[in-house]
Amino acid sequence: MANILVVDDELGIRDLLSEILNDEGHSVDLAENATQARNARLNGSYDLVLLDIWMPDTDGVSLLKEWAMAGTLTMPVIMMSGHATIDTAVEATRIGAFSFLEKPITMQKLLKAVEQGLARSTAQPPASAAAPAQTNTAPAPATTGAIANGAPAPAPVVAVMEQAPMSHQGFNLDRPLREARDGFEKAYFEFHLAREGGSMTRVAEKTGLERTHLYRKLRQLGVDLGRNKRNA
């Protein structure tokens, strides 16, 4: 489990990213502007930061530069934007951004970018930003999302493809990722509910989710809680 900070001025994006990352077992803090992000960074340590570029008080690139100059850019930072230009991407990369995600952000791209960022954090923590200009001498980090308006990404794009059969254990995988994931998760939770006799406490323990989050997830998936329901 990693500690992740999500910085975005749009409530819907913050909630969406938080839900996805929480489902993956990560601990997520949220900030709606640069001021809250500064305070969060001063008061806590993060393994990864998802940082929006366009924010009302201070833009994400300026905040990234602040952290770099202060020597607190000790974690991978993934920039997010639906309107980034190549110049903006190059500038953020020069300062020390790990990669970019283009909005709207798909779950697949988000999880892949987070996985790569956390792997970088574990294998090779970012160097102290006392001299951020040195980042020019190293190859630019691979970007996960494309830059807006169809422009080429400022760094080589790493394509990760996993081969899998079209169906597995009765699941039809030839459909959109979210539908396939929802179908699997519903079957997964129904299996554990049946095995634990409807005990939400035991299912929460087995699946590693808090009961409140578990209830919300089951309602979202349309799982019938009336069958074999037991709160013990």
Image (cartoon, helix red, strand yellow):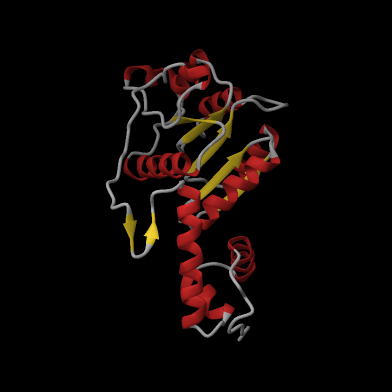
Number of marks drawn: 0
Q: Residue furthest right?
A: 56
Q: Residue furthest top?
A: 87
| Residue 211 in which image quadrant | bottom right
Q: Quadrant of the C terminus?
A: bottom right
Is 9 located above or below residue 208 in the figure? above
Q: Position of residue 189 (x, y in %)?
A: 50, 70
Is 105 located above or below residue 152 in the figure? below
Query: Does residue 120 appear left or right of residue 45 in this picture?
Result: left
Residue positioned 30% across, 40% down in the render:
161
Residue positioned 52% across, 80% down in the render:
202
Q: Position of residue 68 (x, y in %)?
A: 51, 27
Q: Is residue 73 visible?
A: no
Is 169 located above or below residue 180 in the figure? below
Q: Is residue 155 visible?
A: yes
Residue positioned 28% across, 53% down in the render:
165
Which residue is nearer to you in this view: 3 or 204?
Answer: 204
Q: Position of residue 67 (x, y in %)?
A: 55, 30
Which residue is nearer to you in this view: 59 or 199?
Answer: 199
Q: Position of residue 32 (x, y in %)?
A: 69, 38
Which residue is nearer to you in this view: 161 or 232?
Answer: 161
Is 55 located above or below residue 213 in the figure? above
Q: Quadrant of the N terminus?
A: bottom left
